[in-house]
Amino acid sequence: MSYDSIREVIDASLGKVPPTLIIRGGTVVDVFTGSLIDADVLVFKDRVAALASPGSSSGEVVVDARGKYVVPGLMDAHVHVESTMLIPPRLAEALVPRGVTTLFIDPHEVANVMGVEGIDVLVSLTDGVPLRFFVEVPSRVPTAPGLETSGAYLGPVEVAELLRRPYAVSLGELNWQNILSGREEYLLKVAEALRLGKVVNGHLAGLGGRGLDAAVAAGLMDDHEAVSFEEALERVRRGCAVMIREGTSERNLDAIVKGILEAGLRDLSSFMFCTDDKHPADIVREGHIDHNVRRAVELGMDPVRAIQLATINIARHFRLDHLLGSVAPGRLADIVILDSLERFGVRTVIFGGEPVYVDGRLIWEPPKEVEVPERVLRTVRVSEELAPEDLLIRAPEGCGRVRARVMGVVPDQIVVEALEAELPVAEGYLRADPGRGVAHIAVVDRHRGTKSVGRAFVKGFGLRRGAIASSVAHDHHNVVVVGTNPGDMLVAVKHLASLGGGFAAVLNGKVVADLPLPFAGLMSLEPLDTVVEGLERLNKVAKDALGSSLKAPFMQLEFVTLPTVPEYGLTDKGLIDSRRYVVVDPVIECLEEAPGQVGE
């Protein structure tokens, strides 16, 4: 705050000048004590000036909150906005009506495609948007050096530069493998963040015991990868905050909240809510962080405690509680008025002291068109020489049947099981077995347009025919394609290149549904409804025409490639054992010779 603004808010607090807005007659949720108080909220410009006795103040702009609850704007402690497929102005249309006013974003998806330039363009699109965006500076671009092709590199110098920018609040999620391996560049990034007084976000999937001790000792301060209460408790007991994640394909809230309630934990200050990755159709269907609050209450959590996990706990963790996370003097006036605490029914949203959503109507006007640099729209480059057989695994010479490693998809989770299967060989290549649920999967370089292709098998998508493909593939964001035959797979890959990125479904050599995502091959420029309709059409086609058994096959497709989550990931370099961080051969052994080989 400037000198003049401090003087002004003092005068407003003392009643020497009238407030610019009064929220009258409501019940304020006091997130500091966990209690409810009846008070008028006096706002001067963008700040809360005072909590006054009901009816004791007058002003020109009054919001009637009688019989309603006044709460801080909700926050998401960790989100990759790219996963919403909506650029910031379009995302605001979806989140403001749900009472979300602040996002802590880790833009390592766009950073893996375009580096610092991509982050700069994304942040520039937040100007004038009624959402606060704080950046968790990407720490791992690329995520798995030497094991993938990415579009950019953010080393210690680039990360240090980004950490000094006003919007930077932390060093973004850093996976434990990079820390415990002792790689110098990652330790330098952590050291610089700590020197600057920034939070260091962790990515501790599957880690426990002494390894967890070492990661926390090295400076990692939180984790959003806990999938059970036992994992969450182990982290919190070591002073590592837990972001309870409820996204589209990663749903951990029920298990952790149930555990918290059953254990009777009294201090929940180390817990907070995040979405990590959530598709727009799920935001429309069930909500965003407001859904996390409602679901926690449904499970038995006190509504005020649930709101604390979505507000003050997050603000304190990121050392911003002097600005955000509460309805209190001096804080930014990001305020939500509710009909019900239990249902979290949003009536009004105030952002920076200005109403932006009132009685079911968004009164903030998003821009009709958004201009972005042309280069951002041309990031998917696939080799013109790519052929169907390039997407298949060549069998060992003379082999007619093999035992192969298979990636096992776990519905609603991003972990991948290490499975095995016996697979046939035809014309010298290993073949999928759709009848047993085993499909081909390949990752194709899209950053440099080379013929670098990683190949494996996957079980769990349930495809009976055709192929689905995505240019969103964490974290390298090459093109990933799953299919029952290489012809359809290749059509899907090349179609995405022609779109500039997105999702596609192919059957019998024809594209039957797609969703263009031209912003770095990750996000749409279109409004929320258009994106949701396109995604729903794709999911329906994948289920009805191709036979997929998954609720959200394209979200699952995005994460099956991740090389940092147990047990397997897939990059253009091959199948990755994510515990050992090495490329492994999909073929385990030859089980029988090909016909005509015996005795030759």
Image (cartoon, grey):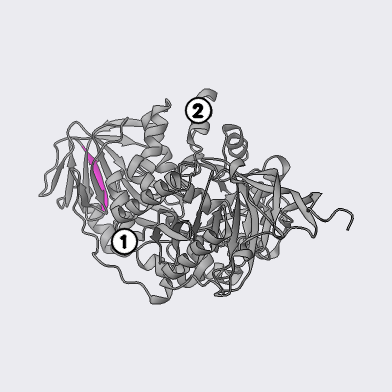
> Does the segment drawn in magenta span residue 375?
no
Magenta part of the chain: 47-52
Q: Position of residue 461 (x, y in %)?
A: 54, 45
**Residue 348: which quarter of the image?**
top left
Is label 1 in a helix, a strand or a loop? loop
Task: Give x and y (percent) for residue 152.
Answer: 56, 71
Disc 2 target residue: 258
Quadrant of the image containing the C terminus = bottom right
Seen at 57% across and 48% down, the residue is 221
Amino acid beneath label 1: Glu
Specify the principal SS of the magenta part. Answer: strand
Q: Quadrant of the N terminus?
A: bottom left
Could you tell me if residue 368 is visible in this image?
Answer: yes
Identify the residue at horizontal 61%, vertical 41% (top origin): 436
In the image, is residue 360 above or below residue 582? above
Q: Which residue is mark 1?
A: 526
